Amino acid sequence: MSTLPIILWALKTLKTTIKKALPALLWHAIKYALNKGKKAFDFEGSMDPGVEQFFRNFGGNRELYLVLKKNDSLLWKVKEKLRG
């Protein structure tokens, strides 16, 4: 289990009236983690370019994470069988 502080979920809606609340909250969370002796803050990234840019504006480094998924789809199995 990771000992890094992470942001598991952040939400911004079209009805948001305080537009800088989420960045301010994240910035304070990063500073709090630093004061607690943490050396990194894990945003867990995003495949969405806008979200990724938002996270990168905090000065983070891009990290590659590999994801393995098991596919039990019958269609996938048939496709793989036909491919050889």
Image (tube, rainbow, N blue to C red):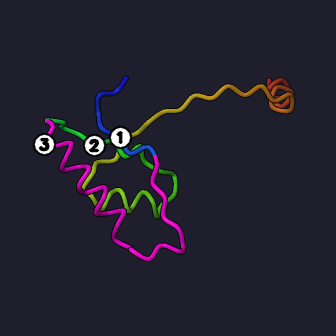
Q: Name the residue under label 3.
A: 35
Kindly identify the amino acid type of the residue bearing the numbered disc 1: Ile
Q: What residue type is labelled 3?
A: Asn
| CA separation in Å, label 3 and label 1 | 15 Å
Residue at the disc numbered 1:
6
Q: Tell me whether the residue at label 1 lies in contact with that at label 2, contact meaning CB atoms closer than 8 angstroms.
A: yes
Structural distance between the alpha carbons of marks 3 and 2? 12 Å
Q: Is residue 22 left or right of residue 16?
A: left
Q: Give the range drawn in magenta.
A: 9-36
- Are there few (<14), some (14-19), or many (20+) residues within 10 Å of tag 3? few
Which SS class for mark 2?
A: loop
Among the two numbered marks 3 and 1 on one chain, the one whose residue lies closer to the N terminus: 1
Q: What residue type is labelled 2?
A: Phe
Where does the image place residue 21, in percent across and percent down from the top left? 34, 67
Q: Are marks 3 and 1 in contact (CB under 8 Å)?
A: no
Question: Whole-percent x and y of residue 39?
Answer: 18, 37
Q: Nearer the viewer, mark 3 or mark 2?
A: 3
Q: In this view, does 9 lie to the left or right of 57?
A: right
Label 1: which secondary element: loop
Q: Is 81 or 64 nearer to us in this picture?
A: 64
Residue pointed to by mark 2? 41
- Return the disc, 3 or 2, that comes first in the chain's sequence: 3
Q: Relative to residue 50, is residue 44 depicted above or below? A: above
Q: What SS does tag 3 mark?
A: helix
- The answer to which of marks 1 and 2 sits earlier in the sequence is 1
Q: Quadrant of residue 78?
A: top right
